[in-house]
Image (cartoon, helix red, strand yellow):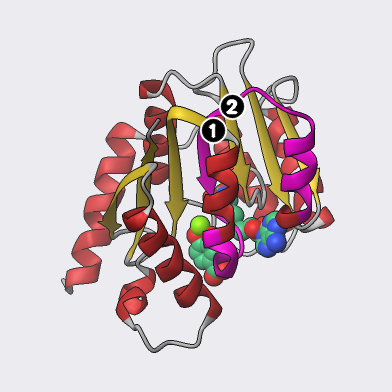
């Protein structure tokens, strides 16, 4: 077995025992694929990590940037108490429509709201509503805007909130300081912002398995 085959096998083993898809999450993936959405949701193990983070956080309010078909949304929303609320921002009306169906089938449509539009337009509108601070923000949209999303997350959270960024390793491309690719530049800017910001304490974990070599950054909001 090659190294990456070993990583896939181990991911499959962990998933089978710790975070298997159920009918609802499996159907969300199936319908997303059938609708032609790109197969770039978090994996089941990663979804379970997000869910556990939200639970450890005692999250009642979650903000997600980048819904796709609602797969990560479902994992996160399942961590919420009955009165909890999740708002997910999605650029594509087509993705949002698929996501809303998947979320409704999961019985989470009372708690989850998908808002369509470029997140950098939805975020100021959301801020104007003066929502209670979000306990967890999951950033997983266009990576070039990652530093802007981290700044918005800071405005919409409180001391003790958690900010999670997906896709921070990108097969190792993140270390290419001279890259002109938007995703690399945006992710590097976000990592460096987290590292230098007086109100953030962060780290990043590298992941292998179902989605190849990638990673998550985690940042706690300080007072
Ligand atoms: N969080 C999802 C995957 C999101 S994929 C999951 O793990 O299941 C990234 C999504 O971000 C895509 O659906 C894409 O349409 C959306 N997106 C891209 N640019 C965006 C923008 N400017 N504002 C909001 N969403 C955006
Ligand atoms: C891409 C986006 C993601 O959010 C992800 O998890 C993997 C890939 C992409 O745009 O290629
Ligand atoms: Mg992602």
Instruction: Note whether 138 is above or below 83 in the view shown.
Output: below
Asked whether residue 25 is in view, the answer is yes
Image quarter for residue 16? top left
Q: Nearer the viewer, residue 7 or 165?
A: 165
Q: Which residue is mark 2?
A: 133
Q: CA distance from mark 2 to mark 1?
A: 4 Å
Image quarter for residue 179? bottom left
Which residue is located at x 51 percent, y 83 percent?
A: 181
Q: Which residue is mark 1?
A: 157
In the image, which residues are magenta? 121-147
Disc 2 to disc 1: CB gap under 8 Å: yes
Q: Residues within 10 Å of mark 2 (few under 14, many from 20)?
A: some
Which residue is located at x 40 percent, y 35 percent?
A: 48
**Dot placed on the residue nearer the N-terminal end, 2 or 1:** 2
SS class, disc 2: loop
Q: How many marks?
A: 2
């Amino acid at each position: 077995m090659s190294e990456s085959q070993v990583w896939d096998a181990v991911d499959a083993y962990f998933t089978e025992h710790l975070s298997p898809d159920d009918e609802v999450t499996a159907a969300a993936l199936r319908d997303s694929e059938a609708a032609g959405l790109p197969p770039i949701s978090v994996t089941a193990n990663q979804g379970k990590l997000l869910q556990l983070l939200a639970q450890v956080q005692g999250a009642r309010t979650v903000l997600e940037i980048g819904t796709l078909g609602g797969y990560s949304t479902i994992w996160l929303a399942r961590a919420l108490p009955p009165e909890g609320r999740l708002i997910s921002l999605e650029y594509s009306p087509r993705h949002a429509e698929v996501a809303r169906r998947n979320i409704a089938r999961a019985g989470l449509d009372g708690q989850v709201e998908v808002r369509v539009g470029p997140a950098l337009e939805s975020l100021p509108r959301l801020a104007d509503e003066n929502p209670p601070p979000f306990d967890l923000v999951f950033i997983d949209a266009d990576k070039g805007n990652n530093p802007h999303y981290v700044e918005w997350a800071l405005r919409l959270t409180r001391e003790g909130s958690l900010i999670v960024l997906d896709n921070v390793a990108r097969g190792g491309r993140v270390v290419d300081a001279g890259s002109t690719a938007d995703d690399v530049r945006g992710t590097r800017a976000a990592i460096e912002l987290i590292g230098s910001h007086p109100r953030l304490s962060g780290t990043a974990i590298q992941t292998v398995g179902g989605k190849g070599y990638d990673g998550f950054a985690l940042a706690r909001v300080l007072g």
